[in-house]
Amino acid sequence: MKNFGKVYLIGAGPGDPGLFTLKGKSILERADVVVYDRLVSPAILSFCNASAEMVDVGKMPTHHKVKQSEINKLLVKFAQGKPGAVIARLKGGDPFVFGRGGEEALELIDAGVEFEVVPGITSAISVPAYAGIPVSHRGIATSFHIVTGHEKQEMQTCHSELYETKNFSSQVELCPLGRSTKGGVEESSISGLDFPALAKCPGTLIFLMGISNMEMISRRLIECGKDPKTPLAFIEKGTTPYQRTVMCTLETAGETILRENVTAPAITIMGGVVELGKILAWRKNLPLSGKRLVVTRAAKQASGIAAKLSALGAEVIETPMIETRTLCEESSKVVLADLSNFDVLAFTSTNGVDSFFELLFRAGLDIRSLAGKKIASVGKITEKKLLERGIRCDYVPEDHTGEGLGKLLAAICHSEQAPRVDGSRLDESRILLLQGNLADDTILKLLPKATRWVVYETLPVATLPDWKREAVAGADAVVFASSSAVENFMKVTGCTAASESRVAPKLAFSIGRLTSATAKKYDFEVVESEETSMDSLVKKIAEYYSV
């Protein structure tokens, strides 16, 4: 291959970011260009390298934003114009299951461009599973057949793959569908699909992209002898928080689509296995199903709460509002050398914990240098972070704020029963505050003799990419854990309290009264957690939507 960039044809799966492959995620994290489709979820796009060039070629069912032939040429152009670059072609589902990935691969071969296929989980199997419908089940269906309900007219053949199971031969057929004159499509290409054979097939039929043609499909199957009472399910937006299952029978398919307003993206599944969905449906019981939540925590902190919210059924859009950076090693050496001058180390954030220990290890020191020192934490989240490092906290205020920590330490220092360290009475001049550059002076006003060491700096995120701005605009709520996150969120979204073109949702979930006060200043309807912990916040969010 010539010195071109390399193209990766990546299947994004059906929508749930948890079903995206580790290999695909690894490629997105280092990709220089990402060419993505409409059906790729914002949560998966958030895996992309922040500096990657994002190219939206998304296609609607009735409007091709970018024609397939143009996409093929675009991939070649990027590869030839960016030697050594990583170009990710991100497609919904699997690129080789009605994803036209084969066409793109052939174009790349003709142009001498190296490529690799990264399979994705096809919606044909995963979406029914999320609706509680197994595509095969002993005693009901020993084969399943995947059929495209929207295909090029010139395709006239079926392609099949055979898989052997332990007990029987299970056939998986991938078949193109012909068009009918009824409903505005052409009947002449109907020979592309053997309706009589499918009508007699005892297995499960799965139609992808066929909602607009389903009235014709069901009619032809019945004409060819398939039982009109065959159970059928339409599954919209499968594996996403907006998943919806509509059940009917083959003979009522057309009227059900109209009555229930079934819209793409959706798949259709036919056969006796559909009845199992009435018993095995599990996802509909998740409390945050159908909700999109924007999490504004820093990237390295967001994954914990994001995972918890996703497990409850929410679509989580990770939108960090700040980036943190540990101070340079040289500026810290003097302070680290003076650790012996302090009896209490007070941590006011998890970022402070991470940065302090990073600097400690860089300087060739470790946890042993903290022997005999008292440890103070602003709240439970920071306390938990210290516990992960094997350090128990001596002081944690009931009021988990900087003011609460300052008052607690001041009370201890000024108490007649103040603890003694090495025989000497503890005083505030031997307290070291480990904070970020944006921390206010609340604690120092309560402890004027204490020493403050800035161990990390906070940098606000300057902009949001277009795809993320669109995702935020369609969200149900924003999750805030700090006042600075609120301020910067409003700045990057261009919102003000009185803005008529407000991009942000009106609802906010918040940790702490200071964060809540800032959110209210921008006209958010605020729901505050009972405690200043992520677990408490997640519980509050679930309770709010379960009412």
Image (cartoon, rainbow, N blue to C red):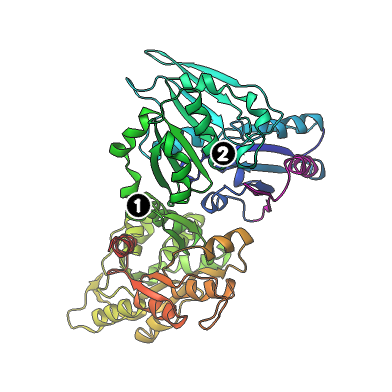
Q: Quadrant of the C terminus?
A: bottom left
Disc ID at residue 312: 1
Report if residue 277 lies within the magenta region. no
SS under mark 2: helix
Magenta stretch contains residue 60: yes
The answer to whether the residue labelled 1 contacts the one labelled 2, judged by CB atoms less than 8 Å apart, is no
Three-letter code, disc 1: Leu
| Residue located at (52% from left, 61% from top) | 319
Q: Write the residue at 77% across / 29% down.
A: 109
Where residue 18 is drawn, which disc sits there? none
For mark 2, what is the residue?
A: 213
Q: How far is disc 1 from disc 2 in space, using C-alphas?
A: 34 Å
Of residue 404 and residue 42, the one placed in the foreground of this image is: 42
Specify whether residue 111 is in view. Answer: yes
Task: Magenta stretch: give its range.
Answer: 51-79
Q: Image point 41% across, 58% down: which residue?
A: 291
Q: Nearer the viewer, residue 306 or 42?
A: 42
Q: Quadrant of residue 507?
A: bottom left
Q: Nearer the viewer, residue 224 or 97?
A: 224
